[in-house]
Amino acid sequence: MGMQHGAMALQLRSLVTAQGELQLSLVDVPVPQPGDHEVLVRMEAAPINPSDLGMLLGPADLGTLRAGGTPDRPVVTARIPDAAMKSVAARVGVPMPVGIEGAGVVVAAGVSGAAQSLIGKRVAAPGGSAYSQYRCVRADELLVLPDGASAVDGASCFVNPLTALAMTETMRREGHKALVHTAAASNLGQMLQRICTQDGIGLVNVVRRAEQVQLLRDIGAAHVCDSSSPTFSEDLLEALVATGATIAFDATGGGTLAGQILSAMEAAAGRSTPQQFSRYGSTVFKQLYFYGGLDPRPVTFQRNFGMAWGMGGFLLFPKLEQFGEETTRRLKQRVAAELKSTFSSHYAQQVSLAEMLDPEVIAVYARRATGAKYLVLPGKGLE
Amino acid sequence: MGMQHGAMALQLRSLVTAQGELQLSLVDVPVPQPGDHEVLVRMEAAPINPSDLGMLLGPADLGTLRAGGTPDRPVVTARIPDAAMKSVAARVGVPMPVGIEGAGVVVAAGVSGAAQSLIGKRVAAPGGSAYSQYRCVRADELLVLPDGASAVDGASCFVNPLTALAMTETMRREGHKALVHTAAASNLGQMLQRICTQDGIGLVNVVRRAEQVQLLRDIGAAHVCDSSSPTFSEDLLEALVATGATIAFDATGGGTLAGQILSAMEAAAGRSTPQQFSRYGSTVFKQLYFYGGLDPRPVTFQRNFGMAWGMGGFLLFPKLEQFGEETTRRLKQRVAAELKSTFSSHYAQQVSLAEMLDPEVIAVYARRATGAKYLVLPGKGLE
């Protein structure tokens, strides 16, 4: 099927040793053989998402990064603080592939008709080993990219686009009419703003710096609140009153922001419908989901937002399972149809697998800064 | 109907003034006239629940309590710290009746058959003005006490019994098989233990002091974890593994306990079904509800329990509404049937309405200490 039997290809591995060391390496693995319902994808592009960094770097102290190995088989190591070893106990000694999504070309397929029909197609795939030259994926998990879309266009078409769509879907299903999003200047945040503009949904964007306000205004955001501004509390309250947002999706996952949002929602509820005083607060149900962990501090809040509230974790793939196949298919179709508009992503840099293991490069993408997203090209420089 | 028209009776009122003062007083109010579907209850006994204290005392600084008025029309005042005035803004200048439940005798009734049929019956009633000599209540909201039950037996038959039953009902409806309860040596906690023993439900009791362990063991508790013990973490984990509890009801509402429980549930999930390492944690859904606020500190937690979790507020009456009429009726029937066994309450002291306003008495019941629950007898000493 175009692949020589016994051929080898590169795969990135992340290993935590019992001695408290993180090792990132490129290893030669046999090109896998697709099962009956699988296809073999030659990976062309895979983003480094914030959610990849946890698996890739774990709790390693990046101040201790050291390069080793050879130029095309680099190995980079770093110390893991003793206190953090408990959190990675389950992966000690197990070299793990990394990369939760990416795009490439189907170069071989299993015997099923569905798999065979994909040969030669450019596809995007979810899953855990995107930083590989080749990988096998179940045919029904793929998204076939539209004509004219490159692997770079399609590399990020699972995590961010589907997460953004899952947010508005969750908002509707749980009976809310508008939403709040934090770290809103991210690629995902920009997609969410475009979705909300298109669908007529009220969106309150919370950002952390003044320059991010303009970025979102430029793509049509009506409500952008800068948490570094002295008027943040008032701005947030006004935006909540204006939109009626009672559900929030928080990417920071630590500190006091979550409680502050619920508290402001409660104040907005009191403002919109003046109620009799109740020490149990309003009857307006307020929900906050954490979907990221940009802020490593503990979550802290004073329960000053009544009793009608919920907090929880928000994770894409279990959420899609809960929505069911039909909804998931509908969301994927929208991603494919609007790949170059609503769901376009921007990358600061394109790197090869080997460059991805350069300590100086790691130091940049590990910062998770807005506008500093990296794209890995697994075929680059290693042919 | 036995009540002279224009008769007056005493009612306790709690007032927050714009000047930052809390005033508790006994006021003479006209005995209310029951509407068509209401009955007039001569109140005989009403407990001081932790949830009454918020309305009664608000955020007043109890170090500043001062007695005033006359022996049978006492007025007691205290300062409210400036910083706390915002939290009570909605009740400034509005004298509020207090008391969320109590029992007494029906002495008059509206014209409806349902109301008329209750005349002379001893009943328990929910609602917000139990610290009164007389009050009107909707006939369909009452619980008729069984023969031989006194008002003292029935005074606490709404909040604690129905809250305890609503916990096991919620546990079942949300798909859990065992539960965790904190501040578990309370009257409510003892009821919950008796319910769980009777219904064969696994219950993990969390208490704060060694002597509370014995109290619960004496009524048959299999799992009691003392948070002041150096082995608390291990004890909690063992109890969670043994019971499979994945839902918790927390009365403390502040500090780090909530997060500690979710974290231990996650560890127990990993122990029961060893899973492949996932940086998103286990797929076992863990829920924690706050139903009280014994601990005034902010809630603080490290999100180290995966993504499959929820937190929220738990409030009895909205919960019963959600369960629906049939379930609520079933739960009430159980309370009446087991009033003197499962749902018996213990009081440290019985006080009159006037004694309830004595600063020394307030200082005791405001502590919310286990075993120091007070019962108010609105008819006592003021006939």
Image (cartoon, coloured by chain):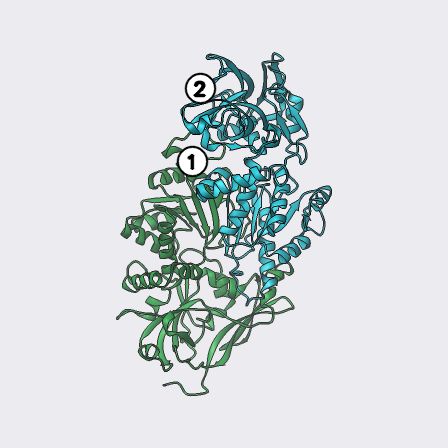
Chain colours: A green, B cyan
Q: Observer-nearest residue: B42 or A1?
A: B42
Q: Residues within 10 Å of mark 2 (few under 14, many from 20)?
A: some
Question: Does B89 sit above or below residue A56?
Answer: above
Pinpoint the chain carrying mark 1. Answer: A
Q: Observer-nearest residue: A59 or A263?
A: A263
- Of tags 1 and 2, the one toward the viewer is 2
For mark 2, give the secondary structure: loop
Query: Horizontal and vertical percent for residue A178?
Result: 35, 46
Query: Horizontal and vertical percent for residue A326?
Result: 33, 62
Left or right: A184 as drawn, with respect to B374: left
Amino acid type, mark 1:
Ala
Q: Marks 2 and 1: in contact by CB < 8 Å?
A: no
Q: Quadrant of residue A336?
A: bottom left
Amino acid type, mark 2:
Gln
Left or right: A202 as drawn, with respect to A93: left
Whether marks 1 and 2 lie on the same chain: no
Disc 2 target residue = B33
Disc 1 target residue = A267
Query: Which residue is found at the position 38% from the left and 33% from the top?
Result: A271
Query: Which residue is found at the position 73% from the left and 42% from the top?
Result: B211
The quadrant the C terminus of chain B occupies is top right
* Residue found farthest to the left: A147
Q: Observer-nearest residue: B208 or A352?
A: B208
Q: Which mark is residue B321?
A: none
Query: Which residue is found at the position 46% from the left and 44% from the top?
Result: B323
For mark 1, give the secondary structure: helix
Query: Horizontal and vertical percent for residue B225?
Result: 68, 49
Q: Residues within 10 Å of mark 1 (few under 14, many from 20)?
A: some
Q: CA distance from mark 1 to mark 2?
A: 37 Å
Q: Is residue A93 visible?
A: yes
Pinpoint the chain carrying mark 2. Answer: B
Q: Is residue A228 visible?
A: no
